[in-house]
Structures are given as C-alpha cells and as structure tokens.
Image: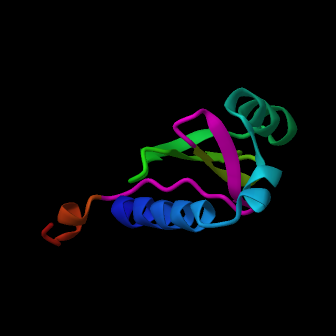
Amino acid sequence: MKTHFLALLVGVTALVLSTTSTQAQANCAERDQVLERLSARYGESRQSVGVAANQSLVEVFANSGTGSWSITVTMPNGTTCLVASGTSYEGLALVQPSAMGQTL
C-alpha cells in the first residue's frame, strides 16, 4: 500500500511538472511561506515524504481533526508548489502484506 501511495505521488508530481510554468507559478512560493500557510490556515502538518525521480521532494500534509490535506512538491531550487488538496483525510495504520499471508 505504501509503495502504491508513493507511486501515486510520483505520478502527481510528473503531472504537475509537465504543466506550463505560468500555471505552476500560480501555486508556488518559497518553502517556508507554503509550510507556514498550511500550518496557520489549515492546521496541517507533514504526514509523509518521498523523493521523486527528478530529486524534488514530495510531501503530504494533513489535519486529522478537520480532514484537510495538501500535497506539495519542492523543487531542488527550493521553490515549493501546491499540487493537490482536499478533504476527508484519514491516516492509515498499514499492515505489511507478508503479515496478511502474502509474500512480497
């Protein structure tokens, strides 16, 4: 499940990176500014992180109380872009596939 989620994040990242620079600039700012806004406005904190093939940092932020969530991509130059957001976030306690009788 974790691998599938990370693959989804990488796919979203690729989609975002393929957009025109004008579209991307509308949702991008310095990393500190983006993280401050997610924290102050939505009460979101980082829930997961991964590195995409192009060395950008992909992060999921969420507020388990309100259910809001956001996905950001931080480019190697430090610019952070909001690529997706929504509601109904749920943290999952994952069970490893081998523990469910499946082999890896």
Q: Is residue 87 magenta?
A: yes
Q: Main secondary structure of the magenta part?
A: loop
Q: Quadrant of residue 102?
A: bottom left
Q: Is residue 36 above or below residue 98?
A: above
Q: Quadrant of the C terminus?
A: bottom left
Q: Nearer the viewer, residue 86 or 59?
A: 59
Q: Is residue 73 magenta?
A: no
Determine the residue positioned at 58% across, 68% down: 15
Q: Position of residue 50 (x, y in %)?
A: 43, 46
Residue at the farthest left position:
103
The residue segment tinted magenta is 75-95
Determine the residue positioned at 78% across, 61% down: 23
Q: Position of residue 72 (x, y in %)?
A: 63, 48
In this rendering, would 69 be left or right of 2?
Answer: right
Q: Is residue 4 above or below residue 89?
A: below
Determine the residue positioned at 52% across, 64% down: 14
In this rendering, would 71 be left or right of 10?
Answer: right
Residue at the farthest right position:
41
Q: Quadrant of the N terminus?
A: bottom left
Q: Quadrant of residue 88?
A: bottom right
